[in-house]
Amino acid sequence: MSKFGSSALDRRGGPRATLQSAGKVLCGAFAWDCVIRDQSATGLRIQMLSSASPPDTIQLVDLVSGCAHDVTVVWRKDREFGLKILSSHDLRGLAPAALQTAKRIWQASQGRI
């Protein structure tokens, strides 16, 4: 049974793990704080800590796991967003130039700059 009752249709592609991880939403020169509420192999649910409403295609940095995800927004409700993972990148090793901002943000969160 889902938290919305037995009649709710669960459209998830797979099981999700409930999390409370710190994250950053990146879009160009902007970075917003968020909390990653749950994650599956193909998607995430985040809660923005501000009233910012990012565009449909963004990058999400999981500050706990050291991963960056290229994602697209599939739904929005108030400050919560459902994201579809397009690709994922490990920031703990060498990273291409396109991930340098994400890597610097992750390193700063770990006190490693």
Image (cartoon, rainbow, N blue to C red):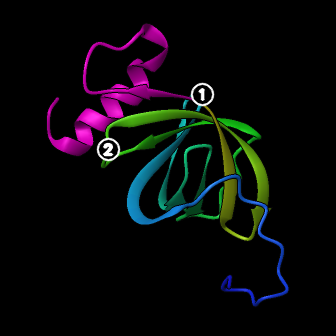
Label at residue 38: none
Q: Nearer the viewer, mark 1 or mark 2?
A: 2
Is residue 44 part of the magenta span, yes or no?
no
Q: Residue 20 vs residue 30: left or right?
A: left
* Occupied quadrant, residue 71: top right
Label at residue 65: 2
Q: Is residue 23 above or below residue 85?
A: below
Label 1 vs label 2: CA separation? 22 Å
Residue in view at x 79 percent, y 61 percent: 11
Q: Residue 86 vs residue 93: left or right?
A: right
Q: Secondary structure at mark 1?
A: loop
Label at residue 28: 1
Q: Residue 93 vs residue 112: left or right?
A: right
Residue in view at x 58 percent, y 60 percent: 15
Give how far across and how far down residue 77 sits, in percent.
76, 68
Q: So how many labels did they put on this image?
A: 2
Is residue 99 part of the magenta span, yes or no?
yes
Reading the chain from its start, which is encountered first: label 1 or label 2?
A: 1
Residue in view at x 34 percent, y 35 percent: 105
The amino acid at mark 1 is Gly
- Residue range corresponding to the magenta coloring: 87-113
